């Protein structure tokens, strides 16, 4: 077994490194926090991140998406790691960000909107 991270290609792939502290993962996390304008200090461990991920105030849909964000980021990072490891495929950081946003939108559509079109929901919100 090789002890190196398939994402950043540096030594020491652990769960916490892969999902939180790897420069590729960190870039994705930073992008999300910047988009929602939240200053954030990343905990050392995944379990600590999940433990401090609090509910947000607001409508049900926003709160539900907020709860999905860490799981969706971790899922996308895990899929990307496996694609790099087993299929010799690698997304750019921009492609990885878009993959995350698309996945999050798909989850939102399936879970919150019961399969309805998320774009229709977003256009309704913008008109309100």
Image: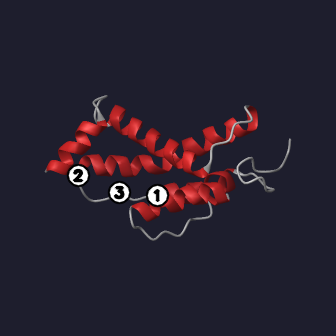
**Which residue occupies 62% across, 64% down?**
44
> Above or below — where is 98 with respect to 33?
above
Q: Secondary structure at mark 2?
A: loop
Instruction: Please tell me which of labels 3 and 1 falls first in the chain.
Output: 1
Q: Which of the two marks, 3 or 1, is nearer to us in this view?
A: 1
Q: Residue at x 72, y 52 (%)?
A: 14
- Measured in 3D between alpha carbons, the distance from the residue under mark 3 to the one under mark 1, in whole angstroms, is 16 Å
Which residue lies under the disc numbered 2?
A: 59
Circles 2 and 1 in contact, beta carbons < 8 Å: no
Q: Counting other residues with Cα less than 10 Å from the Cα at mark 3, is it few (<14), some (14-19), or many (20 or more)?
A: few
Determine the residue positioned at 44% across, 58% down.
53
Q: Position of residue 65 (x, y in %)?
A: 36, 47
Q: Are marks 3 and 2 in contact (CB under 8 Å)?
A: no
Distance in Å between CA atoms under marks 3 and 2: 11 Å
Spot the residue most to the left: 128
Point out residue 10 in the picture as x, y percentages from the top left corner: 79, 56
Local SS, label 1: helix
Asked if 91 appears above or below 42 in the picture, the reply is above
Outermost residue to the top: 115
Q: Which residue is mark 3?
A: 55
Instruction: Decide if residue 29 is on the left or right side of residue 128.
Output: right
The answer to which of marks 2 and 1 sits earlier in the sequence is 1
Locate residue 17, reporting x and y percent.
68, 56
Quadrant of res 88? top right
Q: Position of residue 20 (x, y in %)?
A: 61, 57
Disc ID at residue 32: 1
**Front disc: 3 or 2:** 2
């Amino acid at each position: 077994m090789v002890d190196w991270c398939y994402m950043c290609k540096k030594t020491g792939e652990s769960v916490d490194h892969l999902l939180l502290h790897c420069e590729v993962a960190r870039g994705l996390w930073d992008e999300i926090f910047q988009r929602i304008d939240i200053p954030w200090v990343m905990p050392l461990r995944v379990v600590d991140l999940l433990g401090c991920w609090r509910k947000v105030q607001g409508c049900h849909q926003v709160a539900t998406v907020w709860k999905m964000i860490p799981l969706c980021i971790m899922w996308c990072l895990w899929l990307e790691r496996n694609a790099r490891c087993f299929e010799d495929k690698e997304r750019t950081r921009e492609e990885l960000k878009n993959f995350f946003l698309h996945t999050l939108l798909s989850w939102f559509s399936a879970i919150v909107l019961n399969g309805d079109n998320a774009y229709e929901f977003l256009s309704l919100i913008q008109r309100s």
